[in-house]
Image: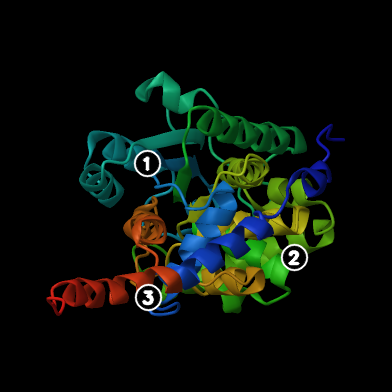
Amino acid sequence: MSSLNLDDFTDLIERPDGGVRRDAEARRERQIVPPGSLGRLDDLGEWLAAAQSAVPVRPIERPRVVLFAGDHGVAELGVSARPAGGAGELVREVLEGGRPVSVLARRLGVPVRIVDMALDCDPEALPEDVVRHRVRRGSGRIDVEDALTLQEAEAAFRAGVAVADEEADSGTDLVVLGDVSVGGTTAAGVLVAALCGVDASVVTGRGGLAIDDLAWMRKCAAIRDALRRARPVLGDQLQLLATAGGADLAAMTGFLLQSAVRKMPVVLDGVVTAACALVGQRIAFRAPDWWLAAHDSGEPGQAKALDRMALEPLLTQGVTVGEGAGGLLALPLVQAAAALAAELPEQPKESEALESAEAPEVAEASEVPSEQ
């Protein structure tokens, strides 16, 4: 039995401040650009104001990319274009600055934090601050065995909670959440299919490197087999993560929920983060109010999860690489919404407008010489 009571999150998580959002809407109506003319930027600015409980909204000054990393045993079946156990190499490339997320983060001036939860590599090969939360080396092959023990799932979930607390305590004001994994989209597909009650074929995508038809069929079969094992434990979300998720997915779920507790907004990157968010919604129904969907990657599992949570992606770029790259593309949009909401001037009040209109007439009248 786990000592972790997930029901506590239902009580701890509040919605963003509705009163502040109404104040933000009222302020928006007074600004010089008509309401609605900025499209979704209006909604984004009001959402940020409610999340920050501040009008005008504060600028996003300390964003951060947080990536949870892990290898998944199901990758042994050839469900990914990358070799099984290859996530450690991806992590090294991110750290060395050679991945898309590294390039975008440099350009935007956003720090990147990587949290190893279950990489299948020697921990000495990576920095201590990356590996210190690791739960195990690789996750189990979910089509035939559990990804984790229940104790490992709890440890991973608690690690995610701890990382969220560390970020909130350090002053991070928005997180772009992503994953660095091999086989992670297969585990994500199982979670989405189980929670949405659909078949494997509905959620099976091509992954980050666009696998061929044979690999897609292997992936679909793996999700189908893992789904049979996942459905009996749908009522216990921690057990579901242990059965069909993985240490990185369990940690991301804990991170998302604790971020909502700490009122720290999170931008979701791709299908893996969407699947974890869907698990989080099942645990605490108010939690998705603190999350934004960055982009539509084209992965069917992501679309299904976001639809279930009523989250509309900000961008449609078809970015499937993961690693938070799509999330970073949406960050300037969020920052622009905050700037516009805070800095656009308000229309002058009617009395002020009348005074300014009358002032020239008074001046002209004073220039007419009086009769002697």
Q: Residue furthest front?
A: 372
Residue pointed to by mark 1: 61
Q: Quadrant of residue 246?
A: top right
Residue at left 44%, top 42%?
A: 67
**Kind of residue at disc 2:** Arg
Disc 3 is placed on an element classified as: helix
Q: Nearer the viewer, residue 362 or 102?
A: 362
| Residue found 75% across the figure and 32% down from its top | 151
Query: What's the residue type where badge 3 is placed?
Result: Leu
Q: Secondary structure at mark 1?
A: loop
Residue mark closest to the camera, 3 vs 2: 3
Q: Which mark is residue 228?
A: 2
Q: Position of residue 222 (x, y in %)?
A: 59, 64
Badge 1: residue crowd in 10 Å (few <14, some 14–19, many ≥20): few
Q: Relative to the observer, which residue lies in front, 85 or 330? A: 330
Q: Nearer the viewer, residue 341 or 201?
A: 341
**How far apart in space, not on screen, are marks 1 and 3 (Cα)?**
39 Å
